[in-house]
Each structure stands twice: as C-alpha cells, then as structure tokens.
Image (cartoon, rainbow, N blue to C red):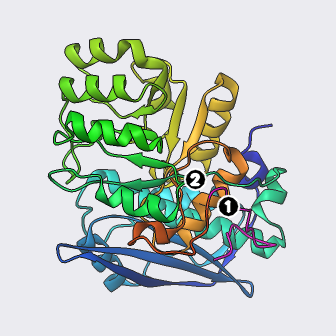
C-alpha cells in the first residue's frame, strides 16, 4: 500500500476560508511576508501556510481575499486536490514560476489538517508512523564579504549547534579554516540550481574544490554542474545532494546521477500526493532524506517539523524553530526537538 492511499480517501467539508498575512522585517531591505490559510468546516478549522517569497504576490493574494470556489462536501482529499489543479490560485503573478506549488501546498496542507480534525485523527495515527525526536540544523548566510562572526555568536550560546551554510565567492582560505575548526558544519549549499533569484550562485570551480576538500564529511547541496565542476566534484558524488530541482519523483529520476540523499522542501511539491509518492520512492531506492524550510512565519514551520519527525528525524534537517532566523538569544529549544504533535490534525504545537 502506498503512503498517499492512507490519506487520499479522507473526506473534507469546507464551509468557508480566510487569509491572514504575516510579516517580519528582516532588514531595511527585506520584509518577509507569508499568508496563513484557514479552511473552516464541520465545526473545525484546518490551517496551512503559503511561503511564496515575493511580497507583491503575497499582498495581491491577501487583497483578493477568499474568492476561490472551495466550499462544499469534498468526497476525498484527492478530489479536493484535483479541484485545486483546475483552479487559478494566483490573482496576478507569480513573480517566479517556481512559486506556484508553494501556494498549492498552503491549501493542500490546510485541507489535510481539516480533514484529519473532522475525522478526529492525527496525521501520525493515519500514516501509522511513530513521531521521533527531530534533529535539526540552523541555516545561515554570511554577508559580503563573508565573516564568521554571525556563526560565532550562535556557537557562544549553543556550542553543540549544527549548521547549514551557503558558500559564496568571498569565502577565502582563512574563513574556511575557521569554519572547519568549529566542527559545526553539516551541509554546504552552493545555490547552483537557482535561476532568477537573489541567492543565485554561478558555478565556481575554485570554490567547489576548496569546499569539497575542506569539509570531507559534509553534504554538498545543489552544485551547478558543467564539464569543469563535474570533474572536480566527481570524487565527492556520494555527498552531493539536491534541493531546488526536486518537485516530484520524475525530478529525482532525472538527476545527473543517482543520489544518496536529498533535501525535501514539502512546499516545492505542491500536492500531498507528489510529496508522499516521493517519500515512498526514496524508501524503495534507499535514498535518505533531510527536510528543508522556506522561512515560514506561521504554522507551515511546524508542519515541516511534523513531517520530518515522521519520515527522517535523524538527518540534518534544516527545520530549526523560527527563532533561529532571528538574532542569537538564550533559552531557545535545542536539537533534537521532542515531538510536539497535536492530538488531531496536521499540527505541531507552537
């Protein structure tokens, strides 16, 4: 039995829905906005979050309000998903086509939460999986020029913290040596698979060689492969992982070589079906998974932690509590996180 079949037949009753905008001023240049989706029906409420990065797309979505024809008795979660496939979820945009599945995920995760709550069951119960303590890493990107000070500030408070970093061309030998000495680095994300975003990183053979040799035990995520970089990284293929290109099983099959592990961001898949199919495929093929986040501000963060605790709790999940996106502060939860599942639905207690 495939995993999706365990949830696909759940009925869901929707009376109405509402949208709530969330925002955090990250810097004078960047305000992070997301939208919480609340589906109401049968005396229950299901929640999800659209993590689309474009502020303009979020503002247009919130301004349009709840105009989609979602109300009614949907025979199954699967039929509700098919309805979303036919609807236009964007009043305008998106700024980047890669954002399309993010909004779909917001609606699908809210519908799954609602269906489970109407059934009086939790996702863990329905999937017949035991939630386990969740190992996480903190993700950060240094400034330009890069300096280790931000990481030092975190390690002063949390000496056992593990991290996922984004190498850039300003990473010189001195910085790399300092980072190696911390012993804190689990994953290095080259950002080579992004196009048209502020974090794009073109292929850099010198950087790739420096990082691969300096961190022999770290995962190397999303390199941009060409004849030169592929030759440099070929001895390290067992450590190469993929994130941005992964939206479905077909994307995994189409990778340049079979992966040993992958980074799953649930919102990239858009639908519950595609995500669970990919979990099953990786289990069958012996591919390990670690989870990733999208700077969620609301319930979406807890939902990716929920999934990680069920499917891949022991890997370097980039699913740290949201407070790790702010300035270092004492008293934060540390890894591993104990499971914090609500008794019904698809919710991680905040």
Task: Give 324 or 213, whichever is nearer the viewer.
Answer: 213
**332, above or below 162, in the image:** below
CB under 8 Å between callouts 2 and 1?
Answer: yes
Residue occupying the point 54% across, 30% down: 261
Where is residue 29? Give x, y as percent.
17, 73
**9, above or below 189, in the image:** below
Task: Give 144 or 258, whichever is nearer the viewer.
Answer: 144
| Any part of residue 12 in sight | no
Rendered-image quadrant of the N terminus: top right
Where is residue 316? Give x, y as percent.
56, 44
Q: Which mark is residue 124?
A: none
Where is residue 275? Give x, y as percent.
58, 46
Which residue is tagged 2? Answer: 136
Magenta residue check for 5: no
Q: Secondary structure at mark 2?
A: loop
**41, above or below 159, in the image:** below
The residue carrying pointer 1 sits among few (fewer than 14), some (14 to 19) or many (20 or more) residues within 10 Å by Cα, namely some
> What range of the chain is rendered magenta?
335-350
Rendered-image quadrant of the C terminus: bottom right
* Mark toward the start of the polypeptide (2 vs 1): 2
Which residue is tagged 1? Answer: 337
In the rendered structure, the answer to whether residue 43 lies left or right of residue 141 reads right
Quarter of the image for residue 224 reads top left
Magenta residue check for 343: yes
């Amino acid at each position: 039995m495939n995993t999706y079949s365990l949830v696909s037949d759940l009925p869901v009753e929707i009376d109405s829905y509402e949208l709530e905008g969330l925002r955090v001023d990250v810097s004078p240049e960047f305000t992070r906005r997301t939208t919480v989706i609340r589906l109401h029906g049968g005396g229950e409420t299901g929640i999800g979050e659209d993590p689309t990065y474009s502020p303009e797309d979020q503002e247009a979505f919130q301004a349009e309000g709840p105009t989609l024809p979602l109300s009614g008795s949907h025979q199954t979660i699967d039929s509700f998903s098919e309805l979303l496939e036919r609807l236009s979820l964007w009043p305008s945009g998106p700024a980047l086509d890669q954002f399309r599945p993010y909004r779909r995920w917001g609606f699908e995760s809210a519908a799954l939460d609602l269906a489970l709550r109407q059934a009086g069951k939790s996702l863990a119960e329905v999937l017949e999986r035991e939630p386990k303590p969740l190992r996480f890493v903190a993700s950060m990107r240094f400034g330009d020029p890069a300096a280790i000070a931000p990481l030092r500030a975190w390690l002063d408070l949390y000496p056992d913290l593990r991290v996922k970093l984004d190498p850039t061309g300003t990473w010189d030998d001195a910085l790399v040596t300092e980072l190696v000495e911390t012993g804190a680095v689990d994953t290095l994300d080259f950002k080579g698979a992004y196009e048209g975003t502020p974090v794009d990183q073109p292929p850099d053979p010198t950087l790739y060689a420096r990082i691969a040799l300096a961190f022999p035990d770290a995962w190397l995520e999303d390199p941009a492969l060409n004849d030169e970089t592929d030759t440099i990284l070929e001895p390290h293929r067992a450590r190469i992982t993929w994130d941005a290109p992964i939206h479905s099983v077909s994307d995994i099959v189409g990778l340049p070589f079979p992966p040993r592990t992958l980074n799953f961001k649930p919102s990239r898949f858009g639908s519950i079906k595609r995500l669970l199919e990919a979990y099953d495929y990786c289990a069958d093929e012996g591919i390990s998974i670690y989870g990733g986040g999208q700077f969620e501000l609301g319930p979406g963060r807890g939902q990716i932690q929920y999934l990680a605790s069920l499917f891949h709790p022991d890997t370097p999940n980039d699913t740290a509590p949201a407070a790790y996106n702010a300035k270092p502060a004492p008293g934060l939860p540390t890894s591993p996180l104990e499971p914090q599942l609500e008794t019904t639905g698809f919710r991680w207690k905040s």
